[in-house]
Image: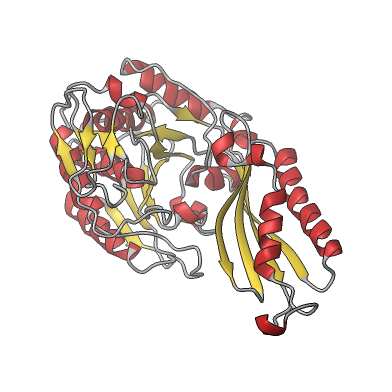
Amino acid sequence: MTNFNAELESRLLRYTVIDSQSDETIATSPSTQIQLNMARLLKAELTEIGATEVQITPYGAVLATIPATAAGPTVGFLAHVDTAPQFNATGVKPRVIHGYNGGAISFPDNPALTLTPETSPYLATKLGHDIITASGLTLLGADDKAGIAIIMTAARHLLENPQIAHGKIRIAFTPDEEIGRGVDPQLPADLAADFAYTFDGGAVGEIEYESFSADAALVTITGVSAHPGMARGKMVNALTLGAKFIAALPAAQTPEMTDGTQGFIHLYEMSGTAAEARLKFILRDFELEGLGDKAALLKSLAATLQAAEPRAEINVEIRKQYRNMRYWLEKDMGPVDLARDAARALGIAPVSVPIRGGTDGSRLTEMGVPCPNLFTGMQDIHGPLEWISVQDMALATQLCLGLAKASAKA
């Protein structure tokens, strides 16, 4: 079995130093021009290793083809170039702890921060592995630059070894996945795959075909502005009403109080003045009924608050994001079963648990291209403790190659 560790380490270190955060407040696609820095690098690398039909689409996705060496369906492999906007990702300084000894990992730029097997139990299973983290002030960006490194490494290997039998393979590196806009309406046609896989999962063995269904909600509260010194009986403070709205939310339905198959209502941003306040939420549930209930709850709270203070104006806007890919994949589990068989062939026990999040695969599946999500090894994502094992990435690369080979017989 080919050892890909050095290449994967080199690629991830190269990719993570490139700032490529997305920004939901910008309507363009991609939402940030810095994502194109990653796109241009990947286009050049794909061209260099001999991929064909390499392009950057008008909506910012990188597409490429690995020509077939045998008959079979066309399989897509996807990862996203953007990193999460929830935490600083500028000035990433990745570092490698070779041969992890099982102890606490400190961070040179943030001495108060510590990564331990007690706080991250999966780390306890990685004794002797090569662990990549950032320096303590930024996220790492293994989500999803690990997926990119895995696909690029597998692509390079296939192109250098044309004796390996596989069907046509389509590669897509998308922008704006972290803000729910990774799958442009044109992508399914441009990808032209019979089925696909995102490499955007966590622990080794994860083969996921269930995700949250997701909506975004914006609550806008317009108050009545007045000079504070002469405000009695006149002012309606939008921020005060916003605080009342938040206080009325059920505490048991927040992300920090839920797990497993429980959904949540997450207030992730609030802004404004006494005149107008804006509360941004994401709504998550594995079932559409539960998702609808959460939207209805926000509207009900808004109506109650509006009735108590008729001088204010309170609006709730719900925007669809993505839907549970299980609704479509459970009708045809072929791509899931193919991935499970490929994992077992590597001695990996497949594990399928609902994703407490979503991937480009959620939207792509809904739009007609079945697309389960596969592991990369990434852990503690979207924060300064993010880390990944190079050896886990190597197993994901072997899985990618196994799926490519299986496509010749699928």
Of residue 209 and residue 223, the one placed in the foreground of this image is 223
Picture coordinates of residue 199, whole percent (x, y): 38, 39
**Quadrant location of the N terminus?**
top left
Q: Is residue 410 visible?
A: no
Q: In which quadrant of the rendered image does the C terminus lie?
A: top left
| Above-or-below relation of 217 to 114 | below
Left or right: 212, with 183 as reference point: right
Q: Can residue 320 be seen?
A: yes
Q: Nearer the viewer, residue 40 or 9?
A: 9
Q: Position of residue 248 (x, y in %)?
A: 72, 49
| Point 58% across, 45% down: residue | 368
Q: Nearer the viewer, residue 73 or 208?
A: 208
**Residue occupying the point 66% across, 58% down:** 243
**Residue at image coords 13%, 31%:** 98
Give the x, y percent position of residue 148. 30, 46
User: Which quadrant of the figure has residue 127?
Assistant: top left
